[in-house]
Image (tube, rainbow, N blue to C red):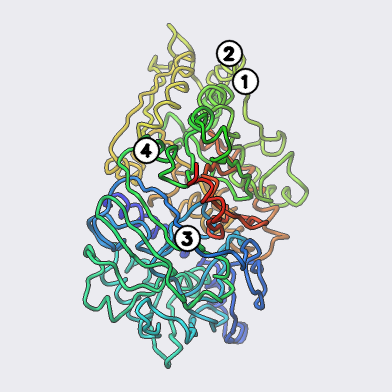
Amino acid sequence: MRLFTSLLVLSLMGSIAHAESHTATTDAAAEKPASEAAAVTEIETTTIAIRGKPAYPPEFTQFKYANVDAPKGGLFTDWVMGTFDNFNPYAQRGDAASGSGTPGARSSQIGPIGVHERLMQSSSDDLLSVYYPFIAEKITYNSDFSAITFHLDKRARFHDGERIKPSDVKFSFEKLTSEGLPGLKQYYSFVEKIEVLDDTRVKFSLNVKDKARMMALCGFTVFAEHFWKDHRLDEPLKEPPVGSGAYKVSDYKFGKYVKYERVKDYWADDLPVMRGIFNDAEVQYDYYLDGTVAFEAFKAGHIDIWEENTSKRWATGYDFPAVKDGRVKQLNVVHKNPLRAQGFVFNVKQPIFSDLRVRKALTYLMDFEWMNKNLFYGQYIRVDSYFMNTAYKATGLPSEAELKILEPIKDKIPASVFTEEFKLPTTKGDGNIRSNLRQALRLFKQAGWTVKNQKLVDKDGKQFEFELLLGSSSMERVALPFRNNLERAGIKMNIRTVDSSQYMNRSTGHDYDMVVSGYGPFAYPSSGTNQQFHSDSVDSSYNPANLTDDAVDHLMEEMLKVQDDDEKLIPLGRAIDRVLMHSYLMIPQWNSSSYRIAHWDKFGKPELRPDYGLGHEAWWIDADKAAKLNAN
């Protein structure tokens, strides 16, 4: 729980930086004379998107991936690693039960249900932040994003029948920022004032004019004041809370299992965002201390669904009888989600990695094809862009539109940006890297390194030596083959694996030579991209390459000016991608554009799947299939 809390705080701090970097552009209008500044107007809407249009129009009646005629019934059993001892995920100690917070993101593969709900709801058909009516049936907001008012649906109810009122929203905000996880008060510091206007409206006035921050309030969780006024949000909660979600706790045994039942006559059943969604009558999470034991439980039918994150097991572990006779289905579901750019990231401030030729040379020594074949069973694709699976990925040579962006900074970026299509070195996957080794040594020689007595040394005879910092021993198996190849070039890489606390401290302070880290995923070049590459964020827990580069800063700042103009943003995004890839800030690793799911054949599924998710929230228990399984 303590590690989760720390990571969440870092995430929230990142959101602050994310919003602040965007604010630099949105506040520009405020600096104009009053005669030039556009008059602030009030906009009323039922849906809102961070950019572009929502996937669904205001008059939509259901998500297209939901079957409104799906039966509601049956028991769905999932599993959780670890233990739990309370029902408050905001507590600063203890372990909260899965499902005791708000539901998992609609775009995730299999997110947990939740007892609490947000003011507005999202969809798995929207790639970016988009919200639809839920507890709030509509919003009004200032055109300069300085205020937002939520109009609550009078039908909205907590589990005990009490109506969800504007005062509950105000209480929830004050409760969360005073007693919630460390960092929340700072994160929500952009809220200047909250006013209950009447029995359906609550208004947030903001001290920062930024759409991203304003929209963050649409996803705000609402608590029942009449319950939580007698409980602290920073302390473990030993009794199930009064919530507003589709499920409430029906049974539990701390450390063993927690069971939820769907609320009868749930107030939101007929809302477009909930029609055909969350169809299981009961959901149970069983707790396991060992993933291998949990998988055996899945094979025995005690767990209904399994999200596979181990390539070896996906390739070799599904030869049990239930798979062979069709009672268990394996799904390899291709998705359209942007992919995270993961790799061995250089700390470019370390003298040993300051030379671009050195970083490029080291890239020749990671044999992805061998690793994919021998470690990952051919299940991964190579990361070759910071915007994989999007329109912003750079290909070929720069277009005319890109050249107009790149020419002004021509002397500050790698010359190869203009002359070479970016391509990573490849091998045949047989372990023979002689050709790549020759290329690497040629680059090292250009950078002043030579091989003497089987060691790569500088002009003073000092061997090329650095440390790879890891926060998990699971990455050692992929680091070792890389180290073996480095040894062939006379390089010494020391692998140091530390505990999570030490890893967080060292990574936050950029106290490393190299780490396994990454960027994104970025749906489009955004303030989040700026956060991970701009010099302004070099002292934060972001910007893993420790990069301070005038040309990159320029591109980031230009990018923030055209957030709502794809005609300009697409070539700018591709130019950014091109410059970053040619800068070799990391040795790109791998990713996958599919979900690996196995499940017992007891589910019914809609004909359509969402664009950016598995759509598991719209599945249902098929009574006939379940009965057939039970008969076997």
Q: Amino acid at mark 1?
A: Thr
Neighbours of disc 1 within 10 Å: few (<14), some (14-19), many (20+): some
Query: Disc 1 vs disc 2: Cβ atoms closer than 8 Å?
Result: yes
Of badges 2 and 3, nearer the viewer stands 2
Q: Amino acid at mark 4?
A: Gly
Would residue 432 be found to the left or right of residue 209 on screen? right
Of badges 4 and 1, nearer the viewer stands 4
Neighbours of disc 4 within 10 Å: few (<14), some (14-19), many (20+): few
Helix or strand or loop: what does disc 3 sit on? helix
Residue that appears at 33% across and 78% down: 224
Helix or strand or loop: what does disc 2 sit on? loop
Q: Amino acid at mark 2?
A: Asn
Question: How many numbered marks, from 0 up?
Answer: 4
**Earlier along the polypeptide chain: callout 2 or callout 3?**
3
Q: Residue furthest front?
A: 631
**Residue on which disc 1 sits:** 427
Q: Is residue 412 visible?
A: no
Could you say where residue 98 lies in the image, as x and y percent from the top left? Answer: 36, 56
Helix or strand or loop: what does disc 4 sit on? helix
Could you say where residue 294 lies in the image, as x and y percent from the top left? Answer: 37, 40
Numbered badge on residue 18: 3
